[in-house]
């Protein structure tokens, strides 16, 4: 099992460009998450999907959209990138959210917006 | 107010030392508790869950005090490989909404030889 995979690993964008970060998990998990991590700020939740077909905003959703394409895949889109979106983005998945189930993270995408 | 508060450190300790991290959470509806570990430029990974009665995994001991809304992690006999950032995490279910994890900002530990 690959666990949680993310593409790309690194990306440099110019202000105003758009891109989609891809995430997939092969653990048959119901819940999936997108976080960003900035120095001194910790992990902040952007969007999450408790189950296939549903998505909800987290703490910092502005400037982002998500799609839960199927149970395996959860993508994050930046429609018009801004320098404030320079960050490390982590995707994560969890079997469900009602117990002590472990949350698994992907390796991250390091995004720089110039 | 953040759901989970941690002392960011950094903690710098010699090999063999005992070090303790503390964490407080603000929501009494918090239902499950964890410590995650994050190595530099890597993703967070589960270190251990924290149970009401306290639990131990080798050199690591976790404690939970629900009355004080306080979680701790004790590392005994520190190794160089323990150098990392330790994240305090709580799971909160909000009514009919499925719960999610809330992460502290992390406590940075460096173990020196």
Image (spheres, rainbow, N blue to C red):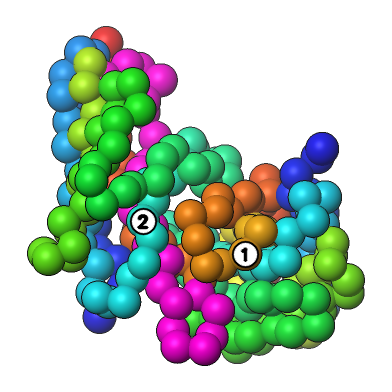
Q: Is residue A30 above or below residue A64?
A: above
* Residue appearing at x 33%, y 47% in the figure: B50
Q: Is residue B82 above or below residue A88?
A: above
Q: CA distance from mark 1 to mark 2?
A: 15 Å
The answer to whether B96 appears left or right of B21 in the picture is right
Under tag 1, what secondary structure? loop
* Residue appearing at x 29%, y 31% in the figure: B56
Quadrant of res A82: bottom right
Which residue appears farthest toward the left when viewing the image? B68
Q: Chain of mark 2?
A: B
Q: Nearer the viewer, residue A11 or B24?
A: B24
Q: Nearer the viewer, residue B16 or B51?
A: B51
Q: Is residue B96 above or below residue B90?
A: below
The disc at residue B33 is: 2
Please provide percent x and percent y for residue B38: 47, 41
Quadrant of res B17: top left
Residue behind mark 1 = A96
Residue B31 is inside the magenta segment: no
Under tag 2, what secondary structure? strand
Tell me the quadrant of the picture where the C terminus of chain A can be found: bottom right
Q: Is residue A34 above or below residue A6?
A: below
Please provide percent x and percent y for residue B32: 38, 60
Which residue appears farthest toward the right when viewing the image? A70
Please provide percent x and percent y for residue B103: 40, 62
Residue B85 is inside the magenta segment: yes
Q: Nearer the viewer, residue A6 or B35?
A: B35
* Residue appearing at x 56%, y 67% in the figure: A97
Residue B94: tell me if it is visible.
yes
Please provide percent x and percent y for residue A87: 58, 62
Q: Which residues are magenta?
A: B78-99
């Amino acid at each position: 099992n690959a666990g949680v995979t993310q593409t790309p690993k690194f990306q440099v964008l110019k202000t105003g460009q758009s891109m989609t970060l891809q995430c997939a998990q092969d653990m048959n998990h119901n819940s999936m998450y997108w976080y960003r991590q900035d120095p001194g700020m910790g992990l902040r939740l952007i969007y999450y999907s408790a189950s296939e077909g549903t998505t909800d905003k987290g703490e910092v959703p502005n400037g982002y959209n998500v799609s839960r394409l199927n149970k395996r895949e959860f993508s994050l889109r930046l429609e018009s990138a801004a320098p404030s979106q320079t960050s490390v983005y982590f995707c994560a998945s969890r079997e469900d959210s009602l117990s002590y189930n472990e949350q698994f993270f992907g390796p991250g995408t390091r995004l720089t917006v110039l | 107010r953040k759901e989970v508060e941690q002392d960011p450190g950094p903690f710098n300790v010699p090999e063999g030392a005992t070090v303790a991290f503390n964490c407080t959470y603000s929501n009494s509806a918090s239902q499950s508790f964890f410590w995650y570990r994050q190595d530099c430029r890597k993703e967070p990974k589960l270190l251990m869950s924290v149970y009401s009665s306290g639990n131990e995994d080798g050199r690591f001991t976790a404690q939970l005090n629900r009355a004080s809304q306080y979680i701790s992690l004790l590392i005994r006999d520190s190794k160089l490989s323990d150098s990392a950032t330790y994240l305090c995490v709580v799971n909160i279910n909000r009514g009919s909404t499925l719960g999610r994890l809330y992460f502290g900002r992390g406590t940075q530990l460096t173990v020196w030889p």
